[in-house]
Image (cartoon, grey):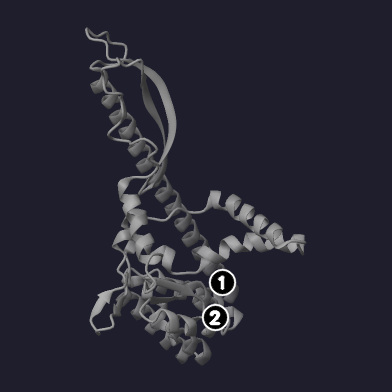
Amino acid sequence: MATTARRGVSVKRQDVEAGDAAGHVVRDQVEELARAGARQMLLAALDEEVNAYLQRDRYQRQAVFRGYRNGTTPRRLTLGRGTVPLDVPRVRDTPAEQTPFESKILRKYQRRSDTIDETFMRLFIEGLATRDFEPACWIADGALGLWAAVNEQSPHSAQQRCANHKTMNVIDKLPKAEQLEATTRVRAIWQAESESAARKLAAALIADFRRAGYERAADCLADDLDRCLTFYQFLEPHWSHLRTSNVIESPFAGVRLRTNAAKRFKKTRSGVYLVHQVLLRLSQTWRRLKAAHLCGQVPLPVSKTKSGRKTNAG
């Protein structure tokens, strides 16, 4: 009976994982379609811009000579939904008295949309140009020393406990026979559609743990629960990036694999070069930030000025 139940749970888990994988594929396809659509519209707009400048369509003759099309120049443009490759049209042999062709849609040497540039500029100003700037969001595991440093140096910043570490900490305090079902229920807390829904799921699971006599697991889940749910205070498209510290740990797993094989380096610079190259290679498969264009809307922490007046940091 127990074996049959475990098999049933295993099948359900496989179904959930398959559904998650299918959903990820669909989301990736939507992203690709969005980028492809943006690319097609940009190329069409650039082509129309050249037509307007030359006052003729492609292969059409004109009464007044204004220049020739001269192929294209490859360009990559970063948008809110990622980077798209473009073939930017060129014009040659324009009359001397005529203003040379310059695209108003895509400026010379432009590599990012204005919205992305504005976001980067704001982050630069707020994060690097002022010493009193508080980061909006800290994400870490349960290391007490780190949180003590954060509280001292960035007391107004939001703090997020890594949901994956919290899950593993809770599961480790349960018998193996209970771990599979408990893992599914704990993860469901972090995947809830709202903070209130997450708290209800957490309260129910804590109560079930206590009824079953698993006090250590119940205490672990209840401990620091508020900090585990901080990501709900931010924009929903960014939740998946804020729940865990995997964004740092996953890349450095690949780095550790390579540096452990090398064992030691004669020069510090050699080690730095190796780490840089490994991260550069790994970065080719990193998942892009969802809704990057919304970064400028991330709420900044509130700090106090010398006069005691509250203000946004930076």
Circle 2 residues within 10 Å: few <14, some 14–19, many ≥20: some
Q: What label does residue 169 carry, if any?
A: 2
The answer to whether residue 310 is above or below residue 250 is below
Mark 1: which secondary structure? helix
Which residue is depicted at the point 33% across and 68% down? 234
Query: Which image quadrant: the C terminus?
Result: bottom left
The answer to whether residue 284 is above or below residue 92 is below
Q: Quadrant of residue 270?
A: bottom right
Residue type for callout 1? Arg
The answer to whether residue 4 is above or below residue 50 is below
Task: Tell me, yes or no, if residue 213 can be seen here.
Answer: no
**Disc 1: which residue:** 6
Q: What label does residue 277 carry, if any?
A: none
Circle 1 residues within 10 Å: few <14, some 14–19, many ≥20: some
Q: Gap in Å between the C-alphas at discs 1 and 2? A: 22 Å
Which residue is depicted at the point 40% across and 50% down? 27
Q: Quadrant of residue 121?
A: bottom left
